[in-house]
Image (cartoon, coloured by chain):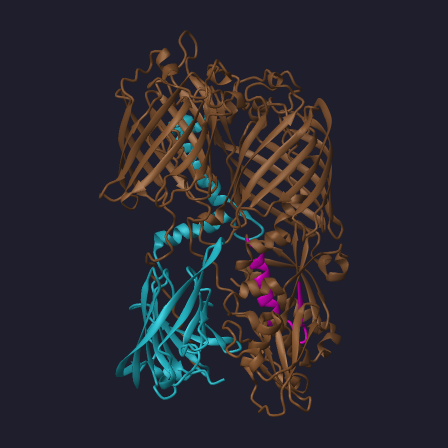
Chain colours: A cyan, B brown
Amino acid sequence: MSRWEQEGIRPAVRLVTGFLAVLLSACSNEGPTVFQRLGALAASKVAGPEEVTGRALTRADLDRIQAATIAVSSGAGPRAYLVPLARSGDYLDYRDEQGNSVVMLGGAISELETAGHDLDAVRFDPRDPIAHLTPFGAWPTDLWREYRFSVRQISTYGLAMHCVFEPQGLETIEIVELRYDLLRVREICTNSARRVNNTYWLEPGSGFIWKSEQWLGPNIGPVTIEIIRPFAG
Amino acid sequence: MVGIALLGLTFSANAEQPLPPPRPSLNLFGMTGLIDMPSAEMQPDAQLSVTSGFFGGYLRNTISAQILPWMEVGFRYSVLDDFFVGPGDTTLYDRSLDLKLRMIEEGPGWPSLAIGLQDFLGTGIYSGEYLAATKTFIGGDLKVTGGIGWGRFSGRSGIGNPLCRNGNSFCTRPPFSDEGGTVEFDEFFSGREMGIFGGAEWQTPIENVALKLEYSDDPYDAERASGAFDPELGLNFGAEYRPFDGVELGAYYMYGAEVGVRLTLSANPFRPLADTDGERPAEPFQARPRPDASALEPDFGKLREPVTGSPATVRFAASGITDVTVEMRDGNARWATAGLPPSADHVCPDEKARAIDAEYGMIDAVTFLLADGRPLCTVALRPKGQNLLRDAIAGTADYPTDWYQNEHARQQIATALAKRLEPDAIGLFGIELKPERVSVYIENRRFRSTPRAIGRTVRALAAAMPASVELFEIIPVENSLPVVSIMLRRSHLEDQVHRPEADWSAWVSARLTDTSPVSWSEIGTLEQFPRAYWSLSPYTPFSLFDPDQPFRIDLQAVAQGGVEIFPGFSANATVSKRIVGNLDDIERESDSELPRVRSDIAEYLRKGDPGLQRLTLDYVTKLDDAVYGRVSTGLLEWMYGGVSGEVLWKPATQNWGLGAEMNWVQQRGFDQDFSFRDYDVFTGHASLYWDTGWQGIAAQIDAGRYLAKDWGATFTLKRRFSNGWELGGYATFTDVSSSDFGEGSFDKGILLTIPFDWLLPYESRSEYSVVLGSLTKDGGQRLLVSNRLYPTVRDMDADGLRRSWQDFWK
């Protein structure tokens, strides 16, 4: 009789105990095994999300950044500050410290790459004033836009929307201690399955968008973008 | 300067994703249906389900799969207690296979229609055929099914079989036999009687709860004969509940006599359990500053962006242009040159370009010439024209190449590249650097999708390579075999990144070729050798269908290690040790009439712990552009040692290949040490591999001599998904007779591979593969070789790369 049987440990318990022991000891000289990464994932689930600490940045802090800067936030969450690390044509690839990426075309987010669900790309109407700087007076009344997404490792799909603009009037907003008098414009985008709202705060004369709340997809929802320091080329 | 306190983004999910197709419920047989009867419905494409159904002492365990959108198959292992009368074991252990084909899909005014064969390959206890029709009402909340059936689906109502006339062959249905394993076509739709069945399913207002009612014509005569089950009615009813997406529970009152229960676990390769991608975002793609397009003005005038997408608003006849010539440029671009009248102003006439396109058809670009012959402007109408212009612009760039003369600088570039690839677990296997071109040999250790590894490499190259390097050649290396060359133009990538469908633009502009055998010493690879590897991981071998105990499982610790002395030449070992389990309890002795090439498995399991599973010297190499070779010698697998040689011809741009394998092996001792038994054999196969390109179906035929010296062929069909799932089956037919083979008549099995990263929110190339077949028979058994060539190279061909190219920029 084995020691385990002497101790009365039942086969099922032995199986589970043995499996866990082998699972946790799985290792390789080629980096973490799938089992080790699974263990780390489980541990993070048990421990919960990392708590965000530290004070909010002031305008004085941000003024020391010698680069274009945007702030991105979701709901009531804290702002993330991103700076452009690459440019391709008019597309600017903004990054935060963790490497999370927000690609902007004009005032529009055209790509989002973070850990989780991503927005692969956006196909813009050539007349789209959000993507192409246009004085408000020359904005089209309606346009189309297509958002592109992926089903992980399987396929891509697109959501095409028809969008119309509704000016909401002038409004004073604050972006990290600076106040701006801007025109608020609501954009209503619809297709047969959904209806989403975007909001933009812009300078009517130039059409420059200082702040916006943009819908980025069914799994991401709306995101707020604020321009801390515009990209100057 | 203050540090930028960048905070992680947190997003909440909501439920606006495209809705998955509705998933109908299953029946007690584990097939889509009512309670004990089938329906004409189908599961969503590729749905895989495991069902346990029980009533009246009869347990049915079924694995079913929606192999194609119109084809459902199920493999069942049933345990029928008290089936036989008399002394001894009265339990029937029964394996059966079902097939259901949809003939008509439901429409607004007609039902779906399906034909099904139940237990058509097994011992026949559940043998029956049916035609079923199902129609949904009230937005899908109510489903009504009706059908007719033969065999097991008839007997209670006493309706005559309309196919049975004047004593023809349809009038006779042979009784249940316990040999099984072959398809008896002449028994289909036969029998004196035909039955009817039908029922309804109602999705109640209570979320995820459905009620079912059905009429079954099955009198359960075979079960009734033993006296263990006495059905009183042909009516069944019950309730079903789905607590979670992949779980179904059912409880029923069966035939007025028994309570039945069902549990189904279900998953779909198209719906990853972890649908989020937790990998770190890719590095930014660093584009070079664009060259000034004005350098092209003397030849092309001003350059205009493509203006496709809207019809011409000017008729060609009214455009005032008469002098148009069309020529082919760069092989396949239709380029028009149009002379403008002297009255033309100096504004580029985009609209007239579209008019020319409409008149002459499929024009990629138009260059307008002023009356004095000077070019005014060029309008690219289509991507081909746009690419030609972009290539011309890129060609005007004059980047310095003096760095190439400095060996230290070249070394630094290579080192920087390797460092940039490290976080993505991509190894730089070799590099060949020229002033305007770089070839990198990469080992992808993390990403299931090779295009994703290629894309990450492209980003690293864009950051690390001097501006003069225009051509990126990336050669993925698998098991030290360079398989395919993917050539990408850096300027194209710079134009494509971030644009909609940037992945497919990159695919279209990539050039794929076979790689030639390479001298490893010339690309710096040898500096990495010799190199060692090792790993320790769990393994869970199991055994199914042993009547003494239908399911046995071990948990083993498996240690693998080896040394690769130079690229392709390695010494490898695998040792296993049982931690816990009961596989060594198998007591069933082989009664095979054939040489016992596999059926002594119980001896190996009992005595081979710890076991030396593999100890080999292996050499793999590329013999020619599309020809690969392998030689292995030593203890090749747990039951055989010897010498194995293989040659594979598989061009990267071709969807089929040919292989040949020859082995001389001797059977190993049961202790799985260095001892051998007194049985040796020459065995080998010629193989045809074909990726059909249809629904991911891959076909393989291996014909030759098997371990028991029997001759024949193995036919394998697999459906392969871009995320690593595989579903399939195989059948081996050799000159061993059905009676010599034993129960089952011939070797066959189900193949299933589940990738771990389908379950987990990050990339992994690990997967769990299982063969539900018989290793305990001796006919049609092949040698198990761990490093066969085709599985190594198959995902690197053009079709394989194209299928997952969507991950290129991720």
Relative depth, front residue between A46 and B232 = B232
Residue in the picture at 51% in, 70% down: B499
- Residue B43 lies, in percent from the top left, at 41, 41
Residue A16 position (above or below residue B330): above
Rendered image quadrant of residue B13: bottom left
Is residue B26 left or right of B556 when viewed as pictured? left
Q: Residue furthest top?
A: B87
Q: Residue furthest front?
A: B317
- Residue B315 shows up from this direction: yes
Is residue B623 left or right of B65 when viewed as pictured? right
- Residue A88 lies, in percent from the top left, at 53, 75
How many labels, in total? Answer: 0
Q: Which residues are magenta?
A: B449-473
Rendered image quadrant of residue B391: bottom right
Residue in the picture at 69% in, 45% down: B657
Rendered image quadrant of residue B236: top left
- Residue B505 lies, in percent from the top left, at 57, 65
Residue B352 position (above or below residue B519): below
Give the prevailing secondary structure in the magenta stretch: helix
- Residue A26 lies, in percent from the top left, at 51, 45
In the rendered view of the protein, which quadrant contains the N terminus of chain B?
bottom left
- Residue A102 shows up from this direction: no
Look at the image and say whether residue B208 sits in the magenta stretch.
Answer: no
Q: Residue furthest left?
A: B205
Relative depth, front residue between B310 and B360 = B360
Relative depth, front residue between B539 and B227 = B227
